[in-house]
Image (tube, rainbow, N blue to C red):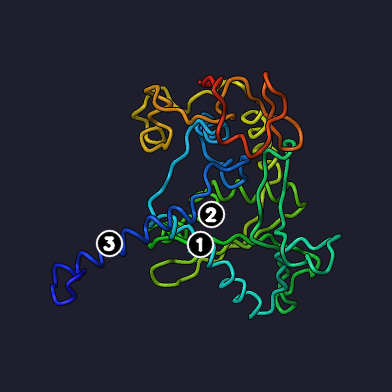
Amino acid sequence: MIDLESPGSLKLLAETIHADIDLWSIDKFNDGPRSHLGASQIGKPCPRHLWYNFRWITHKVFSGRMYRLFQRGHREEAYINEFLEGIGCIVTLFDDDNLHEKDKGKRQIRINDHEGHFGGSIDGKLQLPERYAIKQDVIFLSEFKTKSTSKFAKLQLNGVQLEEHEHFCQMSVYAHKLGLQYALYLSVNKNNDDLHVEIVKLDPYLGQEMLDKAGRIIWSQTPPNKISASPTFFECKWCDSNETCWNNGPVLRNCRSCESCKPIANAQWECARYGIIPKEFIRNGCVQWESLV
């Protein structure tokens, strides 16, 4: 029994609760490797790292604190949309076309490409109120992020295209696929709730370039080139795949990391030995697994 009169015991109890919450957070929010190559990832500079992630060669498990931090970003979306609706914007969050009434309001607006192996979900679309004196047929992509104070200050100084180029690439992919020209990019300072609001003219040509890049990664059976010739290069030094990429470190064992497996149409995977692989089996692999790298 815990002695509630002992300061040392109380401290130990608090530390145990903290540790249990961290473990619960990892179990709750770690969904494992992503099934597709995401629009939010494609702007990352190293194609080798993206390929490792897509083929489930490596996958980083974060701390419980980090998973909670990611969830905070998701929770902010409803909060920000309340602001936008409050000033008169028409916010569209769901793809309700051709859905039965009971299913409306459940399906996020998504883009897909490369036979379903590439995709992403947008935060929403919006129309600004008439008092802003712009054409009412202009639809804006909405993209929301949270930032620490230091990153927030840099974003305010330099803007999203320079300071958060991956986000600009992500939005440009959406622009290309959805036929949009502009985005409202809104970032919240997590420390003081300050807002950075930016109207961004998107680049559909960059969006197509990112889709082409995704295709090269998705359909390749061999690792793409590394971003650098040195493991001490900044991007490599802090990369989640550093040990595997530079030092022949561990490879996750599953169907996608096996040399007999390849992506095919309809977001499916095919084994050279057994044919189309059931989704529920892909994470496990089989006894004939041979590393792709």
The CA span between labels 2 and 3 is 41 Å
Vertical relation: 217 (above or below) 207: above
| Label 3 CA crowd tier, 10 Å (few <14, some 14–19, many 20+) | few
Mark number displayed over residue 95? none
Residue 246 appears in which quarter of the rendering?
Answer: top left
The CA span between labels 2 and 1 is 17 Å
- Mark 3 / mark 1, whichever is N-terminal: 3
**Position in image of residue 94 (x %, y %):** 73, 63
- Mark 2 / mark 1, whichever is N-terminal: 1
Q: Residue tagged by mark 1?
A: 73
The nearer-to-camera label among 2 and 1 is 1
**Position in image of residue 194 (x %, y %):** 45, 71
Left or right: where does residue 135 sit relative to residue 36? Answer: right
The nearer-to-camera label among 2 and 3 is 3
Quarter that holds the N terminus: bottom left
Vertical relation: 261 (above or below) 199: above
What kind of residue is marked 1? Answer: Gly
Q: Residue tagged by mark 3?
A: 16
The nearer-to-camera label among 3 and 1 is 3
Left or right: where does residue 160 sit relative to residue 239? Answer: right
Q: Residue tagged by mark 2?
A: 160
| Label 2 CA crowd tier, 10 Å (few <14, some 14–19, many 20+) | many
Q: Residue at x 56, y 41 (%)?
A: 43
Residue 258 appears in which quarter of the rendering?
Answer: top right
Left or right: where does residue 248 sit relative to residue 185? Answer: left
